[in-house]
Image (cartoon, rainbow, N blue to C red):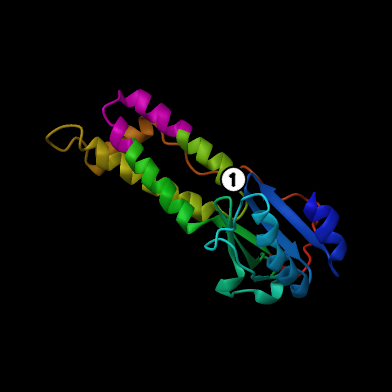
C-alpha cells in the first residue's frame, strides 16, 4: 500500500513492485527514482521492527543495454534473471535456475537418496520421480532446460552412487543400472511453463 500510494506517485517514471512473502524486487524506469526509494526503504521497514538484508539488497542496472554484464543479473525465488538474445537476435529476459538454488537442491536430493536407498526399488523410483516432477513443475520455464538437465544428471549419478552402497559390495555397474532405469524409468526434464504469446513491454530501468 505504501509503495502504491506514496512511492509510485513521487516517481518520474514507471515503478513496479513484485513480491512473494518477504522477498521482493522493485523495478524503476529511472535510476534517480530507484536511489530515492533505496534511501527511504530501510527507514520505512524500521518502523515495523524490520530490516533489510544487506546481502540481498542492491541497486543494479537491468535493461537490454546491460546485456552481457554480470552485474546486471539478479536472483529471485530460486531463479536468476538476466538479459539475453532470442533466436532472432532480439533482447529478452532469460530465466535460469540460480546457481545457489541448484547447489542446494542437489545437496538435498543427495541426502534424500542416501536416506531412502534401502527402500524397495519400485517404491524408490516412484518417490524419486515425484520429487523430480515437482522440481520440473517449478523450474521448468522456457530457456531453463540446461539447468534442468544438470539436475537430472545429478539425480542419476546420486541414485547410482547410493544404490551401490546398499550392501558391502557394489550392486550395479553402469550397464545394469541403465537396464534398471529402462525398466522403472526416471522422469526426464520437461518445460512446463512457456512464454505467453502476448508481448509484455519491459521498461529499461533498475531492479
Q: Is residue 145 left or right of residue 65?
A: left
State the quadrant of the C terminus: bottom right
Residue marked by disc 1:
191
In the picture, measured across the screen, residue 20 lies left or right of residue 199, that is: left
**Residue 124 on the magenta span:** yes
Give, as a single range, the part of the protein colored magenta. 113-130
Left or right relative to 120: residue 102? right
Residue under the image location 54 percent in, 63 percent down? 54
Q: Main secondary structure of the magenta part?
A: helix
Which residue occupies the foreground of this view, 16 or 81? 16
Q: Is residue 91 visible?
A: no
Q: Position of residue 15 (x, y in %)?
A: 79, 61
* Image spot of residue 98 (x, y percent): 51, 56
Q: Is residue 117 left or right of residue 30?
A: left
Considering the numbered disc 1 on the image, is that residue within a helix, a strand or a loop? Answer: loop
Residue 67 quadrant: bottom right
Q: Is residue 65 above or below residue 170?
A: below
Q: Nearer the viewer, residue 72 or 147?
A: 72
Q: Residue at x 82, y 53 (%)?
A: 4
Q: Write down the quadrant of residue 178 in the picture.
A: top left
Amino acid at each position: 500500500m505504501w509503495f502504491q500510494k506514496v512511492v509510485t506517485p513521487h516517481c518520474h517514471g514507471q515503478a513496479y513492485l513484485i513480491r512473494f512473502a518477504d522477498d521482493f524486487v522493485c523495478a524503476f524506469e529511472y535510476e534517480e527514482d530507484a536511489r530515492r526509494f533505496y534511501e527511504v526503504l530501510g527507514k520505512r521497514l524500521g518502523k515495523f521492527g524490520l530490516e533489510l538484508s544487506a546481502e540481498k539488497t542492491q541497486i543494479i542496472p537491468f535493461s537490454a543495454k546491460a546485456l552481457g554484464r554480470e552485474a546486471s543479473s539478479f536472483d529471485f525465488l530460486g531463479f536468476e534473471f538476466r538479459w539475453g538474445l532470442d533466436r532472432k537476435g532480439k533482447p529478452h529476459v532469460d530465466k535460469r535456475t540460480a546457481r545457489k538454488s541448484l547447489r542446494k537442491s542437489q545437496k538435498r536430493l543427495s541426502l534424500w537418496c542416501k536416506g531412502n536407498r534401502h527402500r524397495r526399488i519400485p517404491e524408490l523410483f516412484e518417490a524419486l520421480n515425484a520429487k523430480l516432477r515437482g522440481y520440473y513443475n517449478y523450474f521448468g520455464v522456457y530457456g531453463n532446460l540446461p539447468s534442468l538437465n544438470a539436475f537430472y544428471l545429478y539425480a542419476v549419478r546420486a541414485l547410482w552412487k547410493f544404490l551401490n552402497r546398499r550392501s558391502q559390495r557394489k550392486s550395479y555397474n553402469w550397464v545394469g543400472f541403465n537396464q534398471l532405469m529402462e525398466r522403472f524409468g526416471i522422469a526426464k526434464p520437461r518445460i512446463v511453463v512457456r512464454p505467453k504469446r502476448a508481448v509484455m513491454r519491459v521498461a529499461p530501468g533498475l531492479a
